[in-house]
Image (cartoon, helix red, strand yellow):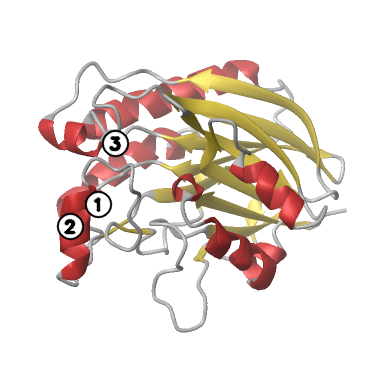
Amino acid sequence: MSRTLRLVTYNLQRGIQYEQIRAHFSSLPALRQADIVAVQEALVPKGGTNTLARLADDLEGEYGWTYRTVMSYPGKEYGNGFLFRPSVAPVADQVVPLPRVGHLGWVARLKTEGGAPDTKSAFAQIFSVGGRHVRVVSLHLDFAGGGDHRVQQLAHLLGVLERASSSDGSAIDVLCGDFNTSGHHRSRSARVQTQRVLDVALERGFTDCSAAVPWTSDLFSSIDAADPARRLLVLGRALGLRYRQKLDHLLVRGARPVASAMAVAAPGHTHLPGSDHVPVAVDLLV
């Protein structure tokens, strides 16, 4: 018997505004009703608590959590993971290291903590949902390297995942997260480059559930003190600048969306406070 599964992808921007994020999970129906939340940029500070563990604890048993490291720096690390309801059960997982960019251009150096190419990996978690297996991949592609590098990363990821897939074709696959498909959302060039990346999955049978969401990130809306470009970002915010990009995507194969994905919003806000990304949610019939 089919059921509806609500899935959300959310880049938490390293949990720098944790109290706001926790309040969203406590109050916004789109998040409170989520069965699975795929998270990027959960923070583990030195001697501190993983952002996902904090959320699961503060939400008083409403969610379980899993996590895998993506990037490590002195005194902290960031990673991908999941919050999930008791109604879905994690049964297996896989970490897929992604190709690393060879060098950083000047813009990438300006935006990359530590000034060296990041390590990147995708975290695939298989959940049992009403007797079916749903494999959800929380991914965070590189900002550095441009569209060509992101195409290479996604093609590599899908190649690894397909070798691990069941042969009967009954599983449901979800790719979601921060694809870093940068550029202003109204830029034709940015849209073309974004489509090149998404086509890697669409040509393998995925459906773009989030195509109707115009943008998912506002560069100046939330500024991390650890961002090497923070001074420029603070100046831009003081000038009232907006730079909205379509960075986050939600692609599905093997299940039908009940409706197009939506950006999660709060009353009175054009951009949900708490992160420079907004959550994107979809209901799937599984």
What residue does disc 2 label?
187
**What percent of the width, then of the height, locates residue 50?**
62, 38
Which is nearer the eye, 168 or 228? 228
Q: Residues within 10 Å of mark 3 (few under 14, many from 20)?
A: many
* Helix, strand or loop for disc 1: helix
Residue at 49% x, 35% y is: 139
Q: Amino acid at mark 2?
A: Ser
Residue 241 position within the rendered picture, expressed as x and y whole percent measured from the top left:
18, 68
Numbered badge on residue 155: none
Residue 21 percent across, percent down from the top left: 56, 60
Judged by depth in the image, the label closer to the viewer, 3 or 1, is 3
Tell me which corner region of the image, top left, top right, bottom left or bottom right, holds residue 134: top right
Q: Can residue 112 be seen here?
A: yes
Q: CA distance from mark 2 to mark 3?
A: 17 Å
| Residue type at numbered disc 1 | Arg
List the residue tagged with mark 3: 143
Whether tag 2 and tag 1 are in contact, CB under 8 A, the answer is yes
- Name the residue furthest left: 106
- In the rendered structure, the answer to whether residue 112 lies left or right of residue 153 reads left
* Amino acid found under the numbered disc labelled 3: Phe
The label on residue 191 is 1
